[in-house]
Amino acid sequence: MVKKRLANGEPCEKCAQTEEMLKRKGLWERIDEILWAVEGEDESPGARVAVRHGVKLAPFFVVRDEDGTETVVTSALRLVRQYLDSAPAVATPADAAPIDLAAAARDLEEASPLEILRFGLESYGERSAIAFSGAEDVVLVDMATSLGLPFSVFTLDTGRLHNETYQFIDDVRRHYGVEIETLLPNGAEVSDLMSRKGPNSFYQDGHWECCSIRKLRPLDGVLSRFDAWVTGKRREGRPANELPVVHADPSFRGESGSLARLNPLARWAHVDVFDYIRRHGVPTNPLHDRGFAKIGCAPCTRARTGSPDEADRWWWEERPAEPAAPDPGAGI
Ligand code: SF4
């Protein structure tokens, strides 16, 4: 394992989290050797291994086969799944006690995003899914990967995304070694809408018909297969009771009826998200550098110009029609 040591002598935060995760799962003994990549010291053993394998971020792992072949693994989750232990112990719905979400919300209100996420993944495992779309969501994927617990990720491909977003999804898939289930809208419904009204009818009669077909119905369908979902939604100054860190989702149903929703980043501000991204080398959508805050469909989102009151989605709608369902997530 190659870990990064900062100039102050401390290991990087993510390296420490990864070590803790491997110890918690009883897998630390399987790490034969630790090499340190020391900040600012290109000749440190870990830095030389990183250069040899073309890796830019620590921690990472070099797995040596019996014949001496070396494979570089940059995702701790992939290391656990493919090389160490493919069956982490997580309670299943059958053997788990019902979860009191209101009590959990009270207990976790002051907890860190990582602790909230750990609660969700330990409680629901792969029966919880991260809704992946934007900057907040890739932070959650990064944290979930560092925990080493099973989880699922899905994204909604509306068919109208920016090309940069498709590249971003691919970058995240490869960076973390995770499968991102991609949900498409019903082809017949899209065909019917476009045949009747053309491709951009939302500019004339509002976005809800198109959003219902391309986003909400696929979302409704995928969530019906899970018991919990994790979103990057933030409060942004609103009271805590408007967005608890954990709650029963009032809008969607899970496989067993109710659906838990976790909002680990509820208490974070926009700056916290990008501070985490910078410190942990998390992949980002290049559109953020061009002024996009939330990135959704290409025809319906635009870069911000700096005015605090400007709408960056559906700006042509003076008074948006009543939503078919609440806004599902940070960028979806
Ligand atoms: S955001 Fe725009 S293009 Fe995307 S689903 Fe909604 S109305 Fe359609």
Image: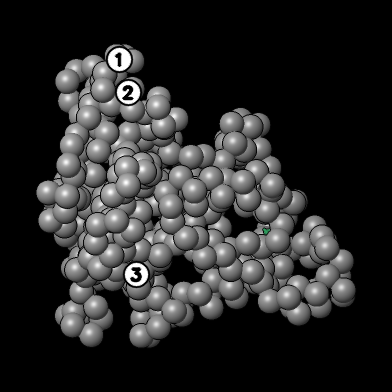
* Above or below 106: residue 139: above
Q: Residues within 10 Å of mark 2 (few under 14, many from 20)?
A: many
Of marks 1 and 3, the one in the foreground: 1
Residue tagged 3: 126
* Above or below 113: residue 224: below
At mark 3, the secondary structure is helix
The alpha-carbon separation of the residues under discs 1 and 3 comes to 41 Å
Q: In which quarter of the view is residue 100 placed?
A: bottom left
The alpha-carbon separation of the residues under discs 1 and 2 comes to 6 Å
Nearest the viewer among 320 and 295 is: 295
> Which quadrant is the N terminus positioned in?
top left
Q: Is residue 269 among the parts visible in the rendering?
A: no
| Mark 1 and mark 2 residues within 8 Å of each other at the beta carbon | yes
Residue tagged 1: 43
| Mark 1 and mark 3 residues within 8 Å of each other at the beta carbon | no
The alpha-carbon separation of the residues under discs 2 and 3 comes to 35 Å
Say which label, 2 or 3, has the lower sequence index. 2
Left or right: residue 199 versus residue 299 is: right
